[in-house]
Amino acid sequence: MTDSRTRLTLPAVAVLAGLLVVGGGWLVWHSSRTATFGWFAYAPMSETVYSPGILTTTDWVGLALVAVGLLALGAVGGHALGRRRRA
């Protein structure tokens, strides 16, 4: 890549990666979960035990977006720190 092209691409990738991290975190934070307590979760004569899954599909998608965003931010930061300067 040419230097001017890299100067324009790196900030765009960094912004996109930051948006992925924030969007994925928001998705995990605000994922809709059903209530597993209260009157409707009461089963007086049942022998089965209900145990809900820890993470939903929405949580997995959000965590994947966060992971991809953090990898991209790491790549941009590594490239910015490791590139050679002109003398």
Image (spheres, rainbow, N blue to C red):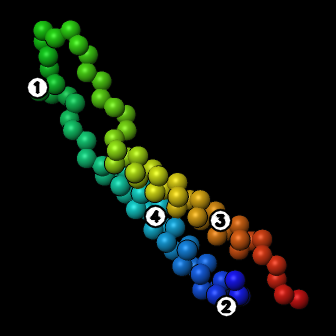
4 or 2: tag closer to the N-terminus: 2
Q: For residue 48, which quarter of the picture?
A: top left
How packed mark 1 is, by other alpha carbons closer than 10 Å (few <14, some 14-19, many 20 or more), is few
Q: Nearer the viewer, mark 1 or mark 2?
A: 2
Q: Nearer the viewer, mark 1 or mark 4?
A: 4
Q: Nearer the viewer, mark 3 or mark 1?
A: 3
Q: CA distance from mark 4 to mark 3?
A: 14 Å
Q: Identify residue for label 2.
A: 4
Q: Identify residue for label 1.
A: 39
Q: Check residue 22 in the rendering and tell me which mark sits there, or answer none.
A: none
Circle 2: residue type: Ser
Circle 3: residue type: Ala
Query: Circle 1 — which element?
Result: helix
Q: CA distance from mark 3 to mark 1?
A: 50 Å
Are the residues tagged 1 and 2 within 8 Å (C-beta)?
no
How packed mark 3 is, by other alpha carbons closer than 10 Å (few <14, some 14-19, many 20 or more), is some
Query: Circle 4 — which element?
Result: helix
Q: CA distance from mark 4 to mark 2?
A: 25 Å
Q: Identify residue for label 3.
A: 75
Are the residues tagged 4 and 3 within 8 Å (C-beta)?
no
Residue 52 left/right relative to 39: right
Circle 4: residue type: Leu
3 or 1: tag closer to the N-terminus: 1
Q: CA distance from mark 1 to mark 4?
A: 39 Å
Circle 1: residue type: Trp
Q: Check residue 20 in the rendering and tell me which mark sits there, or answer none.
A: 4
Q: CA distance from mark 2 to mark 3?
A: 19 Å
Residue 40 left/right relative to 54: left
